[in-house]
Image: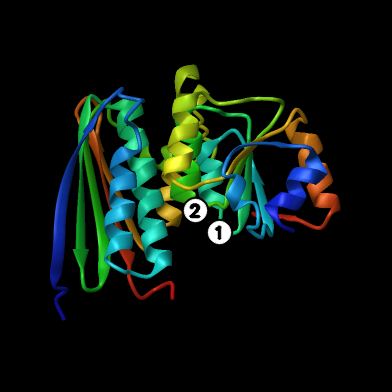
Amino acid sequence: MTLAEIKELIGCEVLVGDDGLAVEIRDVVASDGMSEILAFARARELMITGLTNIQSIRTADIAGVSAVLYCRGKVPDKRVLEFAREKRIPVLTTTKGMFEICGILYGKGLCGVS
Amino acid sequence: MTAVELLRESYEIQGRNFDKAGEISSEIKALLSGLGLDAAPTRRSVIVAFEAEMNVVMYARRGTLTLVLTDAAIGLEVRDEGPGIPDIETAMQEGFSTASDEMRELGFGFGMGLPNMKKNSDEFRIESEVGKGTSVFATIRLNAHA
């Protein structure tokens, strides 16, 4: 499934990387714990988190995930978004909670990583 | 056969500087990626470096991260001046954490850092003295994860 399809399915606003939505997503990692994400993340993966500080984007970059989705309407500050732009990581936000997002994506055949 | 050292870089880590936390690991990622090494050992090394860097920032006054690249492996040595770890065996267990709420708010301190570092290393060793500091030695082989 592409990131563009996920955006439509979940109802997301794109904060960074409008031009990067064609990326194919196979797996999902969802956590507010950055070490959990580092432990299980892989390429072609969507990272879902409620943590909006700069460490969330730093973790996404180090882990090499394809995109970051902030849940429950959270929007990071400008500096964090600028950092994501610099690292070329698409960033989305949605009003839906983490559980609901995961449920929808799981139902569409996306997998978790463990 | 003795490994040939190709590169050695040292970085100073400032304790408690959460704003800059992770910058050194990003620099190492750029450095290793620029050398055209395989993606897997590079990624594993950068995860180890990042977890180690975060630990120093969270717990220690200061620390030094040294990256040593040979023709066989990526080595990381992280030495800090901090509180030390009284019981390394317990600290290595997933889920064990002594982190403060402030650290958890940053997304760290869930008891995954040290196990994560070990998991991503081919050789991993911790030395620690309570009241003085902790040193972590990690080796990631270049040919082990092709």
The front one of A38 and A56 is: A56
Is the residue B68 above or below the residue B49 in the image?
A: below
At which x and y percent is residue A35?
A: 50, 41
The residue positioned 28% from the left and 47% from the top of the image is B27
Q: Secondary structure at mark 2?
A: loop
Residue furthest front as drawn: A19
Kindly check if marks 2 and 1 are in contact, taking CB atoms under 8 A apart as contact.
yes
At which x and y percent is residue B90?
A: 44, 38
At which x and y percent is residue B68?
A: 19, 58
Q: Chain of mark 1?
A: A
**Is residue B97 in view from this perspective?**
no
Residue furthest top as drawn: B101
The residue positioned 37% from the left and 43% from the top of the image is B50
Q: Tell me which amino acid carries mark 2.
A: Gly
Identify the residue under disc 2.
A64
**Is residue B115 in view from this perspective?**
yes
Q: Secondary structure at mark 1?
A: loop
Identify the residue under disc 1.
A43
The residue positioned 25% from the left and 73% from the top of the image is B72
For marks 2 and 1 on the same chain, the one whose residue lies earlier in the sequence: 1
